[in-house]
């Protein structure tokens, strides 16, 4: 779900200077650092308005085991 939200943010019109690749890399860094605040900051403003930060963080924490299980499957090259 979180990855979907980041992808939606990357595809929105008028997304500014952030490229999809930069968003992907920033999200990968947030995952690696277990940093829900950084991941939340990547969401489109509309998604942030619809998803309170506290709910996002709670969901992030609840999905810790799921993120850990896919950690080895995702091989992203970070700068």
Image: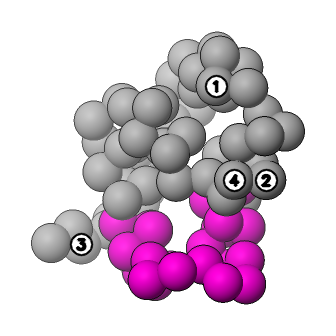
Q: Residue at x 73, y 67 (%)?
A: 8
**Closer mark to the observer between disc 3 and disc 4:** 4
Q: Residue at x 58, y 21 (%)?
A: 57
> What number is the disc on residue 45?
4
Instruction: Tell me the quarter of the image containing the C terminus.
Output: bottom left
Magenta span covers which residues? 5-25
Nearest to N terminus: mark 3 or mark 1: 1
The answer to the question of whether label 4 and label 1 lie on touching residues, with beta carbons closer than 8 A, is no
How far apart, in angstroms, are the residues tagged by discs 3 and 1?
A: 28 Å
- Residue 3, position in %: x, y? 63, 54
Nearest to N terminus: mark 3 or mark 4: 4
Nearest to N terminus: mark 2 or mark 1: 2
Crowd band around label 1 with a 10 angstrom C-alpha radius: few (<14), some (14–19), many (20+): some
**Pointer 1 residue:** 53
Q: Nearer the viewer, residue 77 or 23?
A: 23
How far apart, in angstroms, are the residues tagged by discs 2 and 4?
A: 4 Å
Q: Residue at x 69, y 53 (%)?
A: 45
The answer to the question of whether label 2 and label 4 lie on touching residues, with beta carbons closer than 8 A, is yes
**Closer mark to the observer between disc 4 and disc 1:** 4
Q: Quadrant of residue 32?
A: top left
The answer to the question of whether label 3 and label 1 lie on touching residues, with beta carbons closer than 8 A, is no
Crowd band around label 4 with a 10 angstrom C-alpha radius: few (<14), some (14–19), many (20+): few
Nearest to N terminus: mark 4 or mark 1: 4
**Pointer 3 residue:** 77
- Residue 14, position in %: x, y? 66, 84
How far apart, in angstroms, are the residues tagged by discs 2 and 1?
A: 13 Å
> What number is the disc on residue 46?
2
The answer to the question of whether label 3 and label 4 lie on touching residues, with beta carbons closer than 8 A, is no
The answer to the question of whether label 2 and label 1 lie on touching residues, with beta carbons closer than 8 A, is no
């Amino acid at each position: 779900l979180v990855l979907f939200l980041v992808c939606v943010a990357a595809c929105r019109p008028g997304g500014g200077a952030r490229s999809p690749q930069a968003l992907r890399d920033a999200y990968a860094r947030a995952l690696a650092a277990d940093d829900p605040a950084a991941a939340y900051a990547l969401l489109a403003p509309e998604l942030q308005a619809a998803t309170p930060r506290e709910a996002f963080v709670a969901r992030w924490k609840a999905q810790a085991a799921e993120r850990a299980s896919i950690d080895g499957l995702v091989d992203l090259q970070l700068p």
